[in-house]
Amino acid sequence: MRIRAREITFAVDFGPAFLKIEAMADAIRIRDLRKDFRLGFVPRTHKILKGITFSVREGEIFGYLGPNGAGKTTTIKCLLDLIRPDAGTIEIFGLSHFAPRSREPLGFLPENPYFYDYLTAREFLAFTADLFGLGRTERDGRIARLLALVGLERAADLPLRKYSRGMLQRAGLAQSLVNDPKLVILDEPLGGLDPLGRKEIRDIIVRFKEEGRTVFFTSHILQDIEMICDRVAIIVGGRIVKEGALRDLVSERVLFTEAVVAGLPPEAFAGIGESVSAQGDRVLIRILDEAKVDEALDLVLRRRGRLLSLSPRTETLEDIFVETVTRT
Amino acid sequence: MRIGAIAGITFKEAKRDRVLYLLFFFAALGILASRVLAILTVGDRLKIIKDVGLASIAVFGVLMAILIGTGLVYKEIDKKTIFTLLAKPIRRAEFILGKFLGLVLTLFVMTAAMTAIFLAIVFAHTLEVEGALLVAVAYIFLELVLVTAVAVLFSSFSTPILSSLFALAFYLIGHLSWGLKLILAKMAPGPGRALVRALYTVLPDLENFNFKTEVVHGLPIPPGIYLPSLLYGLCYTAFILGLAILIFRRRDFI
Ligand SMILES: Nc1ncnc2c1ncn2[C@@H]1O[C@H](COP(=O)(O)OP(=O)(O)O)[C@@H](O)[C@H]1O
Ligand SMILES: [Mg+2]
């Protein structure tokens, strides 16, 4: 199915545009990636990745979503050549991932950032810059800019072991940007952060896109992810179960409507919707059938109740996620 | 240059290790004790100073190489700092070489410091500087370089404790294997002799780097021995590092 869709795009765009497609290779192209681990005292084979296929297009924000243990980090480790896959191919901007050069246009933030904790943020960034062979003047200028970008200027000369979780995350982001990467790979960038921290990282991800970078990130929490992703893939148990643009995956369909009513007993709504909870004289009603929404409103008017709120719930990524995860 | 950056960070890390200073303290103690020992004994006091001093440098140098060397690669994997590092455009060979060179630099500094104390003690006794002592120290350092490579090799696939035992075994075998050479000289030609010959070729012979006896007793060192010993050390080190890289390249970092 997926392959056919790709062929169609090619057929339509054939002609002069074909060259453009060639020039704009996908940022990441993973084909049939497989990996087994042999673990335990008496080694048993665990299939971790069971044939992963997807592509990340240049310039987009791509969310790689799935529950804990689905294989997201393993996929990234294969891509970075930290783990050798048993089968399959990975290309980064058209280069095989086995070539160290394929990692030149790439920035990476690991899952729980672990860095040399005896270095200060400034020393650590300088070390990273040296790995890319940046000249001294270029290096110092860029480090100053990155520290400002992630808001660590005042902590720059503190050893990393004194950093909080959120500060480490930001030092990690700065480190991933040292080489001005075209592709940024973030493993659970929102993990373990408070709401404010999550918003900051989200804003930075959006800024990356505006700067023309491709962003590939993983998450097992979907809350407030969907507004920033262009496309997502959902991985469950080492298999991709859904992939595509968010608007194609999430329908506009109304799942149910929630009404909060005051001044009426819950029994009044029998046959219209189920009363979910009651608090004081307020009742929360969930109406599954869209046609019955009017009926509920009529009832409230007739019996002189008060309508406090009425909200249709459309399908979210979370619904799809829960549905696919429970199904598999 | 990338190797240099990794070596630099390794040096920085090794420098922070308390074990290093503990061993250095004992080495210095050993060297100073040789002076006391010399005073308490009759006979050639200078010989005792030289003997105990050089032995201190050799033994504590090797302990430094093993105890720090076996931890360095392992720590990178255990603390997961290696993920960020290898995600850069770095070859795994560069990582191993950087780690190795960083440790060699550390040992160079430590050996230089131990030697300074040693030479000062000798100078206090003789009031003259002896070049031959530096030659002996240089070959001890070459031995340390080889042992460092061995430590890095074992730590690329094993825990620090096991690696330390393996590396220690390598060191001991290396100092006993010359016995095979003696046996070899007395054996009649045949399959048995070929076996011992093969064994001797494979096993390290660290006595090649040992000029202590000559230096201590003021015997002349045959000039023809310097170069082969140097080449032996360098080739063996290169071989061990190659092996380490080969093993390390096949590893998964999960
Ligand atoms: N170091 C490891 N030891 C044992 N099992 C592991 C290890 N790393 C990953 N796994 C297994 O691989 C699977 C996928 O892990 P991972 O890729 O980290 O998942 P995710 O990042 O999606 O949470 C998990 O089920 C886990 O059991
Ligand atoms: Mg993970």
Image: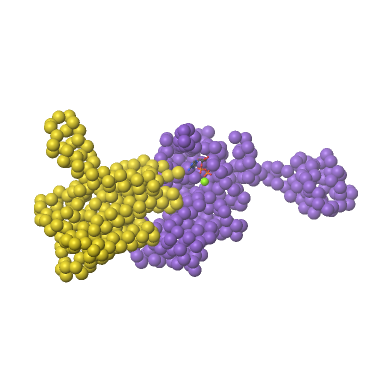
Instruction: From this view, report whether residue B65 is shown above or below residue A34.
Output: below
Instruction: From this view, report whether residue A140 is shown above or below residue B103.
Output: below
Task: Left or right? Give the position of B148 relative to B192.
Answer: right
Which residue is at a point 39% across and 48% down the rendered structure image? Answer: B160
> Closer to the camera, B168 or A47?
B168
The total number of labels drawn is 0
Residue A140 position within the rendered picture, expressed as x and y whole percent measured from the top left: 39, 66
Q: Which chain is purple?
A: A
Task: Left or right? Give the position of A212 relative to A220.
Answer: left
Quadrant of image for the N terminus of chain B: bottom left
Quadrant of image for the C terminus of chain B: top left
Residue A177 in sight from this viewpoint: no
Hey, which residue is sitting farthest right in the picture? A303
Residue B164 position within the rendered picture, expressed as x and y whole percent measured from the top left: 35, 48
Which residue is at a point 30% across and 62% down the rendered structure image? Answer: B29
**Quadrant location of residue A273?**
top right
Residue B73 position within the rendered picture, expressed as x and y whole percent measured from the top left: 37, 50
Which residue is at a point 60% across and 57% down the rendered structure image? Answer: A194
Q: Colour of chain B?
A: yellow
